[in-house]
Amino acid sequence: MAVSKWKQAFLEAGTKALEPRPSGPAGARGGAEERRLRIENEQLKLALAEATVQLRIQRYGGVERVPSPTSKP
């Protein structure tokens, strides 16, 4: 009888641990490292998109360089 109670308590605790938990205002987007990685990821996506456009313009448009706000001189 005690084993079945332990088993039930274990399963309930596991189910509860897997439920999504709301985070507070400071942690709404994760910890500092996670926020830094999210920002870096967005910057890399923008850089890749810009490079892709530049490559397509070079290949198909005949233009050598199109300046953009994110381009570095």
Image (cartoon, rainbow, N blue to C red):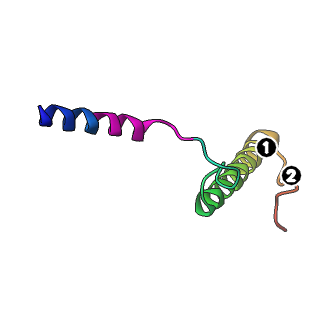
On the picture, is 58 further left or further right than 15? right
Secondary structure state at the residue bearing disc 1: helix
Residue 13: in magenta span: yes
Secondary structure state at the residue bearing disc 2: loop
Q: CA distance from mark 1 to mark 2?
A: 8 Å
- Which quadrant is the C terminus positioned in? bottom right
Q: Residues within 10 Å of mark 1 (few under 14, many from 20)?
A: some
Residue 57 has which mark? 1
Q: Which residues are magenta?
A: 11-21
Q: Are marks 1 and 2 in contact (CB under 8 Å)?
A: yes
Residue at 26%, 39% (x, y): give it.
10
Q: How many marks?
A: 2
Q: The disc labelled 2 sits on which kind of residue?
A: Val
Vertical placement of residue 15 versus 26, above or below: above
Estimate the x, y position of residue 40 in percent, counting from the top left: 66, 58
Residue at 34%, 39% (x, y): give it.
13
